């Protein structure tokens, strides 16, 4: 009896005359963990054609050039043909597993506390897959689409960087002017119809842009709604008003204001960035049953890959030194 009383005393908050206080908890778990980014919701989702997922890109239309003009009384046409290339993207896999011990599940059911916890943990496992997916959409460390070197995606950042369309804004130069100039150069391309649709950057860089507009130009940026009810600032450019979309997965180096920090921004044409999925665009859950350890096993699986079309002209990397 004394041993039992000691166990109760160890778990109780207070024991006294007419009072026996035991710990109770709120039935909801505080949770504001980051789960998604707007980039993955705004790019195109298309079914993969296979492994790898293949497509064609036209790099130039038939153009007879100077030889296209001829004497109308002596017509000698030049034979022309469009230029097309075959491209592909290899599919990658993201998986996560969560196990539920039979004893713990039955204990939780009997206590009738946190009744929703099993479902929450399963949803959080899927969200974990999506967070990994969202980060890798930008930062996946594979170095080649044609000859994969890692199990990750080749992210949009390395694909855009490999395209070679990059601009650097010096420590004393205007960020806004530099970005607007980069957009103008993209729109002025005489070989491709380029109309960028958004500018992605870390919130720290977007804050510097907002401050510059207020300080230098005495302008407060307009706002607009994007996916998921998120409201962002807009920047007027030669491609129209482009949303300045904050993305936490776009990291920067150094300390802004030190002169050695580099903060990247990406001017993108979202309709030309595709996620090629296999099976389903969203993660799928598979239950593996009860093994000898008497645990329920659930595996979340997502197959696919991201490809940036027109990386050398439809998108631009802007590196801001501050």
Image: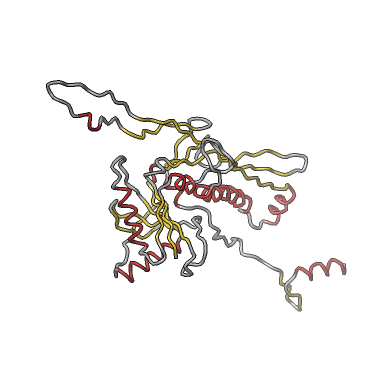
Left or right, 235 with respect to 247, comes to left
Left or right, 216 with respect to 23, comes to left
Quadrant that contains the N terminus: bottom right
Q: Report the number of discs.
A: 0
Viewer-closest of 56 and 74: 74
Left or right, 89 with respect to 93, comes to left
Residue plotted at (44% across, 46% down): 160
Viewer-closest of 192 and 74: 74
Residue plotted at (28% across, 53% down): 238
* Image location of residue 256, percent across then percent down: 47, 67
Viewer-closest of 34 and 317: 317
**Residue positioned most to the left:** 73
Residue 68, by quadrant, is: top left
Quadrant that contains the C terminus: bottom left
Q: Is residue 70 above or below residue 118?
A: above
* Image location of residue 219, percent across then percent down: 29, 67
Residue 58, by quadrant, is: top left
Viewer-closest of 210 and 171: 171
* Image location of residue 84, percent across then percent down: 38, 30
Residue plotted at (14% across, 25% down): 71
Q: Is residue 134 above or below residue 90?
A: below
Residue plotted at (27% across, 31% down): 63
* Image location of residue 213, percent across then percent down: 33, 66
Give the image's coloring scheme. secondary structure
């Amino acid at each position: 009896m004394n041993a039992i009383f000691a166990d109760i005393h160890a778990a109780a908050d207070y024991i006294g005359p007419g009072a026996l206080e035991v710990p109770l908890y709120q039935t909801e778990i505080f949770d504001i963990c980051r789960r998604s980014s707007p980039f993955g919701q705004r790019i195109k989702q298309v079914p993969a054609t296979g492994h790898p997922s293949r497509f064609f890109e036209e790099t130039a239309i038939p153009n007879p050039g100077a030889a296209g003009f001829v004497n109308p009384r002596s017509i000698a046409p030049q034979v022309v043909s469009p230029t097309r290339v075959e491209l592909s993207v290899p599919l990658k896999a993201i998986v996560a597993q969560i196990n539920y011990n039979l004893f713990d599940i039955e204990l939780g059911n009997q206590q009738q506390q946190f009744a929703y916890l099993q479902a929450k943990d399963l949803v959080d496992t899927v969200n974990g897959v999506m967070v990994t997916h969202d980060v890798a959409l930008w930062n996946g460390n594979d170095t080649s689409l044609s000859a994969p070197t890692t199990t990750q995606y080749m992210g949009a950042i390395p694909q855009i960087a490999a395209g070679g369309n990059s601009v650097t804004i010096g420590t004393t130069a205007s960020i806004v002017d530099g970005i607007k100039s980069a957009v103008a150069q993209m729109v002025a391309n005489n070989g491709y119809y380029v109309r960028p649709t958004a500018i992605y950057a870390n919130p720290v860089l977007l804050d510097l842009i907002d401050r510059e507009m207020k300080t230098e130009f005495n302008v407060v940026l307009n706002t607009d709604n994007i996916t998921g009810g998120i409201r962002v600032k807009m920047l007027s450019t030669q491609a129209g008003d482009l949303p300045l979309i904050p993305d936490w997965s776009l990291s920067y180096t150094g300390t802004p204001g030190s002169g050695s920090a580099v903060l990247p921004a990406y001017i993108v044409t979202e309709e030309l960035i595709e996620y090629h999925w296999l099976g389903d665009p969203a993660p799928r859950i598979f239950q593996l049953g009860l093994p000898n350890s008497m645990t329920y096993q659930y595996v979340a699986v997502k197959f696919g890959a991201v490809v940036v079309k027109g990386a050398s002209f439809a998108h631009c990397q802007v590196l801001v030194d501050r």
